[in-house]
Amino acid sequence: MAEAVLPPTPAPRARGALRKRLNAWFESRVARSDTLLLTQRNVYILPTRAGFTFAFTLLVLLLASINYQLNLGYVLTFLLAGSGIVSMHLTHNTLRGLTLRLRPVAPVFAGDAAALEAVLTSPGSARYGIGVKVQAARADTLTWIDVPALGQASARVSFVPATRGVHTLPTLSIETRFPLGLFRVWALWRPASSLLVYPRPERPPATLPAARPVPGGPTLARTADGGEIEGVRGYRRGDPLKLVVWKKAAKALASGGELVTRDTRASAHQELWLDWNDCGALAPEDRLSRLTAWTIAAHRAGADFGLQLPGRDIPPDSGDAQRLRCLEALALWR
Amino acid sequence: MALNLLSLPRWPGWRRLPREARDTLFLLGVIAWTVLPHVQHLPPWCSLLTAAVLLWRARLALDNAPLPSRWVLVGVLLLAAALTLWSFRTLLGKEPGVTMAVTLMALKTLELRARRDAFVVFFLGFFIILTHFLYSQSLPVAVAMLVSVWGLLTALVLAHMPVGQPSLRQAAKLSARTALLGAPIMALMFVLFPRIGPLWGVPQDGKAVTGLSNSMTMGSVSEVALDDSVALRVRFDGAPPAAESLYFRGPVLGRFDGREWRPQTSSFPATLQARANLRVAGPAIGYEITFEPLRLATLPLLEVTTSMAPIDGLRIVQRDDLSWLAERPIYERLRFRAEAHTAFRHGPVSGVLGLQDYLDLPAGYNPRTLAWAAELRRDPLYALADARTLAQVLLQHIRSAGFSYTLSAAPYGRDGIDEFWLDRKEGFCEHYAAAFVVLMRALDVPARVVTGYQGAEPMPVDGYYVVRQSSAHAWAEYWVAGTGWVRADPTAAVAPERISRGRTLAPAPGLIAGTLGTVSPELLASLRDTWEGVNNRWNQWVLTYARGQQLDLLKSLGFEAPRWEDLTLMLIGALSSLALVGAAWAWWDHRRVDPWVRQMERLRRALQRLGLPAAAHEAPRALAARVRSHYGTEGEALAALLEVLERQRYSPATAPRPDTRLTRRFLALARRLPVLAT
């Protein structure tokens, strides 16, 4: 399978070129991996704005203590200073030692949010107030979790890929300010997994093209709408609703059974081709969008359908596997 | 709105409150606790405003109502500033500053919108805590403020636990842990941070604080006499002097303007003034003295102190009237050593012109007293009497003419001495001393008032002697040719027990103390002694810890001539090594593995030594099966242990730590097994 890697979702414009370059440099230092053990080497710490204000407050308290010769003032100042210094270690400790693991990510359509689920495991004490977000996202998108002692907790973050294709997952940042908020400790995590993004389905979807009889197939072909009833069978997922035998089904349901569907043979000989060339005069990406919408509709209708793309044909079939096959082909085309 | 405020909201119960409301109420409680001790210093409008704002905010939190607009806050703030200006005539200084800080803190709670606002509240809170120490640094205040700090830190921790509804207890535990871990750093910095003098002059307000002062009017000492707080503490090297010689000499007041006594400022050239001319006898008494903030430049030292240890950065000299005068008023606690002699004589032996200063009497005051003195002089018995005889006559008169000693004398008028000496005959030490001096002067004997403290209360707990403000005293000195100044304590003539036992008139005890005192006087006394002991230790170790003690510490650590630069270096050194320890711990912690993993690793290595393959991903159960298949019954014990381990680790009730006995037993068993042939 050809792996066409499209450029990842462009990040919102970072503040200033310097910051951008700094971020890029930081990111380049981080190796891609689906599990990450946070250690002293990959956890960063800086004072927050509140931390600086706290330092300023301490300075004022110290000056007041000196000027008024208040020994208890010294005690207060140094108690707060000691707590501040300890909080630096505690904040760092909140992240250090955690293991991050990424759950497998389900493919999504372009424009839909992809949910990344990170599982955080604590090897020892409980960890509080840990926020996870996509690094490029705004600060208010942080997902907050606590990790119990010797336990796990999972955080879901989402990001919206704009284009189809195979995307590398965005860099995640894990941060905490616990306990006093004077320091911000963070780590960057570049998951190694990639995310398959299907084309954005056309909305509203165009009507499906008509099914074609199979050329050279058995001559049992009946009328276009499915032909004579050959028999009935139990409802299978994906059976179109118009094939349900409602009278029989009502009886069957009343006696605790299940829906009953017409079993037509004709559909086996009708083939629905979702063809690149049927898409009119659309741009290639829009054609892919339409084909995606058709794939979804055809699958929902339970029809057998095949996909024809320039350079790639998928023979008709039905069911979930066929849907995935087609969507994947659409995602990765060219 | 007002009605709504008054109707009580339904209380849903502390546990059922929404998280935000609960956190806000907790923070409001902490703020109220922090501000509460200030109520006695704040103008009433500020206390009321603060209480109203806090209650309003609590109401808003309970109702989950929106906060008022910023304009309301600006309005209230401007009003508060105007009221502060109206109350104090200024916005600068301690009292207006505290008032504004408290108001600001209360108003800020109405603006808790973002995290930044919360931080402003916390930092203002820490600042307000400090302002309490401007008024009192006593142990109870310290404990109350420790609770405040704990509360504020807890609120801070709560603000950083955004998930779910963490319990207050949990947050309090976490903040206590932070503070306790920080305590060694605090102790280190407290001990080593070099104490330096005030960086710039701080305005000291002239608010009347009870204690000695540099002047005396009729009735001023009686206010002090009701104040039971500690003025100074003494510890004698050897046996303490007798109670009746425990005079602590403060300001000597020689100038009388009819109403007020002030220190003498002589108009005579220095050569003609009465010099100290101190002559001591007997052995010196060494003692250590600790002053509470005096707010006075004159140090009341034991009479008569001949030398005192120099205090770094403060020049103190002994004046001709034997009082010890510092270059500035003392606003800090002071502790130093000094030497005194209780047997001494002083003052010029023969008459000098400067003694004339001590004969001045204001014209037109107390005419009847002067007439009384003139009549005494006319008495042939005393016409040629010397100063000592005249003093004895006066003291005898006090003893016999129906004088009484009371704290609650009504104020005296313009000719106070007349009124006291001839009519009402009731008063306190200052009345007796002042009347005695006026009469001696009227009888042509140089005399002056000496103020200070008399008597000291021994503390059985720690051997200190405590002198309270209520021991403030005034006595007299008159000049005798051939001897010099002689002390006369007219109060002793009316209330001898006041001097001999050093006990003052006790003010009425409070309700609880009163009840306890009637039920069990011994218990009350011992409680009081214990409390005094604790308080004294607090004073000695925490509050009077200063440059001198720091340098002593360095000396005991082996520095020959310690300077404050050494302190700074030591502090930097100690903090750097602490930082190194912290970094080392982080490094060690980084290499630390889960104890379960470590245990498994050891067991695996033991199996590998036996030649059994044991991969990292294999569960103990799988390893147990392998041991059984290779060793059969011989390896049964080993396999069983592995299964126990599996249960310990993976059963629903997982043990918090691996069982080390199991590990040891496993290793011992593994050593006994033969190594498999590869």
Image (tube, coloured by chain):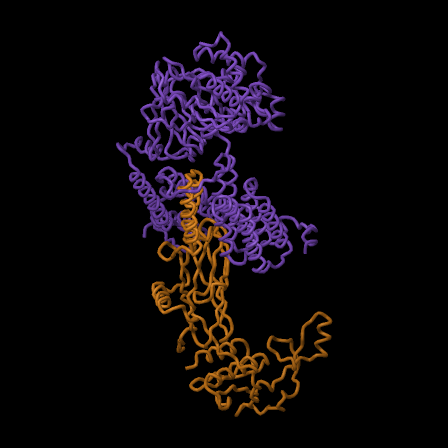
- Camera-nearest residue between B288 and B655: B288
Quick check: A308 left or right of B165? left
- The mark tally for this picture is 0
Tell me which corner region of the image, top left, top right, bottom left or bottom right, holds residue B615: bottom left
Tell me which corner region of the image, top left, top right, bottom left or bottom right, holds residue B305: top left
- Image: B74 above or below B560: below
Residue A219 is situated, as x and y percent measured from the top left of the image, at: 58, 92
**Chain that is coloured purple in the picture:** B
Look at the image and tell me in which quarter the N terminus of chain B lies: bottom right
Residue B15 is situated, as x and y percent measured from the top left of the image, at: 62, 49
Residue B328 is situated, as x and y percent measured from the top left of the image, at: 39, 35
- Camera-nearest residue between B469 and B126: B469
Q: Residue furthest top?
A: B381
Quick check: B527 left or right of A50? right
**Residue B677 shows in this picture:** yes
**Chain that is coloured orange in the picture:** A
- Camera-nearest residue between B564 and B258: B258
Residue B662 is situated, as x and y percent measured from the top left of the image, at: 43, 42
**Residue B595 shows in this picture:** no
- Image: A21 above or below B544: below
Seen at 38% across and 57% down, the residue is: A44
Seen at 72% across and 79% down, the residue is: A247
Quick check: B120 left or right of A37? right
